[in-house]
Image (cartoon, rainbow, N blue to C red):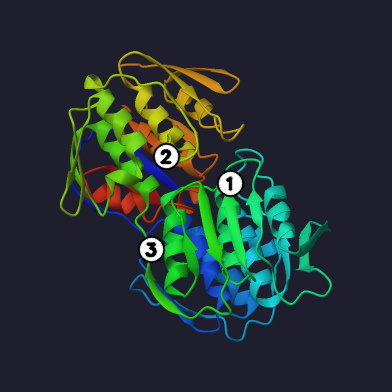
C-alpha cells in the first residue's frame, strides 16, 4: 500500500486550486440515472470514491466517457441492471444514493447496505422511512435493500417527509426521488449543505421543480421526465478548510483558488479567532499565518451545517495540538470519530478523551513518527500534523486519503511542503 513521507518545518506559499467536491460529485453521478439523455459533469475530482461510483453505474449499464480534462459524460439510456452489489459498494457509503433515482425512474432497485469509513453508525432507516412514505416497499434481505413500488403504483408519489435527524444523503435521495414523483413533496428538517444546493441546481437544470434548497424546508413538485444537462461541480469546501488549517499550522501565505467563504463560515471564524488572517479575494480565499507559535487554541463543537462540520474536526484538532493553550473539541455527529487521536499522540500531542469530548493541550513541537490513517479526515489531520513536526513522519494506509483528496501530496508539494508518495 502507498504511504506518504513528510518532513515538517516548511511554510506553505503560493496558490492551490480546489477540486470538485466529493460530496457533490457522488450524488450528481447518481442523478444521471434519472434521465435517458446525456449528462455532462465538469470539475470531477480524481478520487477513489469517484472511481468506485463510476464502476458502479457502469455495472448498471450506464455509458461512461471519462476524458482526462476533468469532465465525465454519462448516458443511462440503456440502463438494464438496477442494482448495486456489495463487491462494488463495500468501501463507499454513498452507494445508498442510487436507491432513490433507481426507484423513481425504474420502480425497482437492489442496493447493498453501504460501507465506508469506520467512524460510526450511518443508519439507512431514514432513507427507507422517507421512500416508503412516497409509495415504495423496501425490505432488507441478505445484506441488500430490495425496493419496488407498492402494488398498483407506476410512479412514486409526493409526500411530506420529516426525518428524525438531519441526514445529508437522505435529503439527497429524497430530492432525486421526488423530482420524478407524482405531486408535491415537502422535506422538513432537510440538510442545508452547499452540496445539497449544488445537487438541486443540477436537477433544476434537468427540468426539476425545486425551491427552498439550502434551507431546512425544501419543496419539490414532480415532473413527467427529466432531460440531460451540463453541470459544473461546486468546489470542495472540506478540501479548502484542510488547506486553510495546513497553512495556519505551518505558516505562510496561500491563495486557495475557487474557495468560497460563505460555504465555510464556522471554520473561518475559528481560524480567525486563533490568529489566522483569512480574506475573500477575487478568485478565492487568501490565508496568511505566522505559524503554530502564534496560534491560540480554540474550542468547538461539531454540528450540522451551517455549524462546524464534523468533516473538519480532525484537521482543526491537529492545529490545536500545536496552538497555545488548551481546547475542548466536542464531536456530536459520529461516535467513533476520535480514532486519529492515538496517532496524533504518537507524534507527541497531548490529548485526553472523555466520551464525546477531546481535551487538547497545545505543545511547542510535535515529533515525526510512523502513523496510520484510520479514516478519510483522520488521514488529513495526520498530514497537517506531519507538516509541522520535527523530522520525518510516515503516514501509512493513505488509501483513506485518496478517497476524498485529489492529489493532495502534489498540491502540497507545489506550495513548498517536503512530501513524497512512496509506492509499495
State the residue in front, 44 or 7: 44
The image quadrant that residue 57 belongs to is: bottom right
Q: Judging from the image, what secondary structure is the residue with disc 2 in?
A: loop
The residue pinned by badge 2 equals 306
- Residue at x 60% of width, y 38% of height: 119
Alpha carbon distance from label 1 to label 3? 21 Å
Q: Judging from the image, what secondary structure is the residue with disc 3 in?
A: loop
**Residue 99 drawn at (x, y percent):** 66, 64
Q: Which mark is residue 167?
A: 1
Query: Residue 72, can we see it?
Result: no
Q: Is residue 325 left or right of residue 77?
A: left
- Residue at x 54% of width, y 63% of height: 220
Query: Which of labels 1 and 3 is toward the front?
Result: 1
State the residue in front, 118 or 334: 334
**Residue 197 drawn at (x, y percent):** 43, 56
Q: Which mark is residue 233?
A: 3
Mark found first going from the N terminus, 1 or 3: 1
For the residue carrying disc 1, how many other residues have a C-alpha within 10 Å: few (<14), some (14-19), or many (20+)? many
Mark found first going from the N terminus, 2 or 3: 3
Amino acid at each position: 500500500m502507498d504511504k506518504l513521507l513528510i518532513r515538517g518545518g516548511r511554510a506553505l506559499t503560493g496558490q492551490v486550486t480546489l477540486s470538485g467536491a466529493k460530496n457533490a460529485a457522488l450524488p450528481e453521478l447518481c442523478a444521471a440515472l434519472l434521465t435517458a439523455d446525456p449528462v455532462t459533469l465538469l470539475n470531477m475530482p480524481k478520487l477513489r470514491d469517484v472511481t468506485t461510483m463510476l464502476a458502479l453505474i457502469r455495472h448498471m449499464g450506464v455509458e461512461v466517457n471519462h476524458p482526462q480534462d476533468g469532465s465525465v459524460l454519462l448516458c443511462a439510456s440503456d440502463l438494464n441492471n438496477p442494482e448495486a452489489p456489495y463487491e462494488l459498494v463495500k468501501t463507499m457509503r454513498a452507494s445508498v444514493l442510487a436507491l432513490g433515482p433507481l426507484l423513481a425512474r425504474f420502480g425497482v432497485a437492489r442496493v447493498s447496505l453501504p460501507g465506508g469509513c469506520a467512524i460510526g453508525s450511518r443508519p439507512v432507516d431514514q432513507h427507507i422511512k422517507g421512500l416508503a412514505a412516497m409509495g415504495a416497499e423496501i425490505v432488507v434481505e441478505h445484506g441488500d435493500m430490495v425496493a419496488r413500488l407498492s402494488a398498483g403504483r407506476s410512479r412514486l408519489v409526493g409526500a411530506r417527509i420529516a426525518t428524525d435527524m438531519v441526514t445529508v444523503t437522505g435529503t439527497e435521495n429524497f430530492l432525486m426521488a421526488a423530482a420524478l414523483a407524482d405531486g408535491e413533496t415537502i422535506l422538513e428538517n432537510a440538510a442545508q449543505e452547499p452540496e445539497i444546493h449544488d445537487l438541486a441546481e443540477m436537477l433544476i437544470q434537468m427540468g426539476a421543480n425545486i425551491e427552498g434548497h439550502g434551507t431546512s424546508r425544501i419543496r419539490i413538485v414532480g415532473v413527467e421526465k427529466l432531460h440531460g444537462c451540463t453541470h459544473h461541480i461546486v468546489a470542495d469546501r472540506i478540501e479548502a478548510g484542510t488547506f486553510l488549517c495546513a497553512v495556519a499550522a505551518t505558516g505562510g501565505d496561500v491563495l486557495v483558488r475557487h474557495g468560497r467563504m460563505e460555504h465555510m463560515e464556522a471554520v473561518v471564524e475559528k481560524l480567525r479567532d486563533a490568529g489566522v488572517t483569512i480574506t475573500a479575494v477575487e478568485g478565492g480565499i487568501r490565508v496568511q499565518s505566522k505559524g503554530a507559535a502564534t496560534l491560540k487554541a480554540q474550542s468547538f463543537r461539531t454540528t450540522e451545517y451551517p455549524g462546524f462540520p464534523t468533516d473538519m474536526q480532525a484537521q482543526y484538532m491537529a492545529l490545536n495540538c500545536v496552538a497555545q493553550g488548551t481546547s475542548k473539541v466536542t464531536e456530536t455527529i459520529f461516535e467513533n470519530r476520535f480514532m486519529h487521536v492515538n496517532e496524533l499522540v504518537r507524534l507527541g500531542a497531548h490529548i485526553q478523551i472523555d466520551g464525546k469530548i477531546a481535551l487538547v493541550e497545545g505543545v511547542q513541537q510535535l515529533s515525526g513518527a510512523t502513523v496510520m490513517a484510520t479514516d478519510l479526515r483522520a488521514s488529513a489531520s495526520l498530514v497537517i500534523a506531519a507538516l509541522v513536526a520535527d523530522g520525518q513522519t510516515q503516514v501509512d494506509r493513505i488509501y483513506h486519503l485518496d478517497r476524498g483528496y485529489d492529489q493532495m501530496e502534489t498540491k502540497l508539494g507545489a506550495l513548498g511542503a517536503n512530501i513524497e508518495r512512496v509506492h509499495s
